[in-house]
Amino acid sequence: MSVHLSHAVVETVRREGRKSYPHECCGFLIGRIEDGDARRIARVEPVENAREDEAKHNRYLIAPERFMAVERNARKDGLDVLGFFHSHPDAPARPSAFDVEQAWPWYIYVIVSIEQGEPADMTAWTLQDDRSQFDEVEMKIED
């Protein structure tokens, strides 16, 4: 499996992480599946982190009604929600134990590390079907 992102998509995720620091940002990865299992991200849709204020620094929450609205709009455009992005303020771009507990198999999870307010590493992951752990997904950044 691989995930294909444009430079514009990558920059949007990085910008959202910078803007939300010291809290986690979050949003949707919207696109289509191509060539078997390649996920091509056409656009991202940032959303407000709905987590209570005291937990926003290391947790994110997407409100269910936002999920339904974004999914409905994506389908109108012939696209699907393929996953989610979020930031890890002053932490590595690797899934946390909390991420493992909250994630769903099949979806792509892009994580950007924000170090002292500036974007650093960015990685992509998918949760194993048995929900035991994440596997890193190859990210291909294209024009």
Image: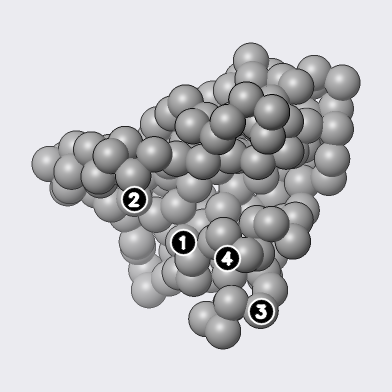
Q: Earlier in the sequence, mark 2 or mark 4?
A: 2
Q: Earlier in the sequence, mark 2 or mark 3?
A: 2
| Residue at (58, 39) in percent of width and height | 60
Foreground mark, 4 or 3?
A: 3
| Residue at (58, 31) in percent of width and height | 52
Does dot 2 land on a helix, a strand or a loop?
Answer: strand
Left/right of residue 113 with respect to residue 86 in the rendered view: right
| Residue at (64, 20) in percent of width and height | 20
- Alpha carbons under labels 1 and 4: distance apart: 6 Å
Q: Which residue is mark 2?
A: 81
- Alpha carbons under labels 2 and 4: distance apart: 14 Å
In which image quadrant can residue 15 be found?
top right
Residue 8, how many percent across, how many down?
51, 26
Does dot 3 land on a helix, a strand or a loop?
Answer: loop
Disc 3 residue type (three-letter):
Ser
When the figure is inspected, residue 60 is found, relative to residue 94, above or below; the finding is above
The numbered dot on residue 36 is: none
When the figure is inspected, residue 74 is found, relative to residue 45, above or below; the finding is below
In which image quadrant can residue 25 be found?
top right
Q: Which residue is mark 3?
A: 132
| Residue at (56, 84) in percent of width and height | 130
In which image quadrant can residue 69 be found?
top left
- Alpha carbons under labels 1 and 3: distance apart: 15 Å
Q: Which residue is mark 1?
A: 107
- Whether residues under marks 1 and 2 lie with C-beta atoms below 8 angstroms apart, the answer is yes
Residue placed farthest to the top in the image? 19
- Whether residues under marks 1 and 3 lie with C-beta atoms below 8 angstroms apart, the answer is no
- Alpha carbons under labels 2 and 3: distance apart: 23 Å
Q: Which residue is mark 4?
A: 126
